[in-house]
Amino acid sequence: AQTVTQSQPEMSVQEAETVTLSCTYDTSESDYYLFWYKQPPSRQMILVIRQEAYKQQNATENRFSVNFQKAAKSFSLKISDSQLGDAAMYFCAYRRRHFGNEKLTFGTGTRLTIIP
Amino acid sequence: EPEVTQTPSHQVTQMGQEVILHCVPISNHLYFYWYRQILGQKVEFLVSFYNNEISEKSEIFDDQFSVERPDGSNFTLKIRSTKLEDSAMYFCASRGTGVNTEAFFGQGTRLTVV
């Protein structure tokens, strides 16, 4: 079974600074996707960024980028130029890359606070 | 932009009562999911659904739970006899059938069992 671990229950960062959220996972699969979802106080799950395991290049999406280390099974999220609107719970998630109805497996989340 | 719609946003029910949570997935999506998030905890998979049948279900999804796609647009989660521990946020998600497609989540239904 796949597991996703987020070891930082809470993080805080000064506005405009950079913060990195950690995620590790365990799987026996070689082909999969990794995701970061943001959950603001409204509680909706919003996709921030995704990484395909077969791609060596780290995904970037504006101020959000990942550091994907496949051998170490590590997938961290870097938020640059942090903004007040970035305050949320952030969940790391895994999905097997397979033709089928594959589910997401989530980590326990990191609550990010932005200090003005 | 297409979105997954869930109703109601908040449901309060008495223990032992049946509840039905409603979801309208994105129209051309064929993979459907229900997830649950107990307050302050992680998001847990409940069930996946495709082609009018359950693809996979978790240990949480016991005989008290059922899912249905009654009319080709709605996707419902029924809890037959609610317990206090069923109080949680329930998220519906849908996805296209391509291997590279993303799951889109609804805004959730907060279920409170009293």
Image (tube, coloured by chain):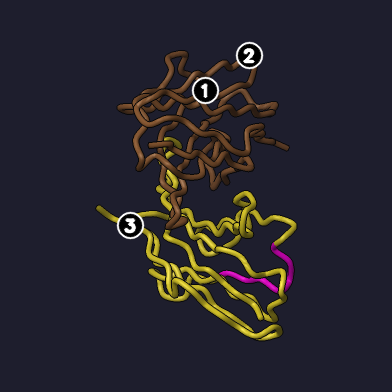
Chain colours: A brown, B yellow
Which of label 2 and label 1 is nearer to you?
A: 2
Inter-mark Cα distance, 1 to 3: 27 Å
Looking at the rendered structure, the kind of residue marked 1 is Ala
Disc 2 chain ID: A
Residue at coordinates 38% horizontally, 65% vertically from top-left? Answer: B5
State the SS at label 3: loop
Quadrant hosting residue A14: top left
Residue A98 sits in which quadrant? top right
Image side of residue B25 versus residue B76, left or right: left
Q: What residue is pinned by disc 3?
A: B3
Range of the magenta residues?
B61-67
In the rendered structure, does residue B49 fall within the stretch colored magenta?
A: no
* Residue at 52% over, 31% down: A34
Q: Is residue A95 visible?
A: no
Front position in the image: A78 or B95:
A78
* Of the image marks 2 and 1, the number of the one nearer the N terminus: 1
**Which residue sits furthest front?**
A116
Which residue, given by chain and number where applicable, does mark 2 sit on?
A71
Residue kind at label 3, given as amino acid type:
Glu
Q: Name the amino acid, label 2.
A: Ala
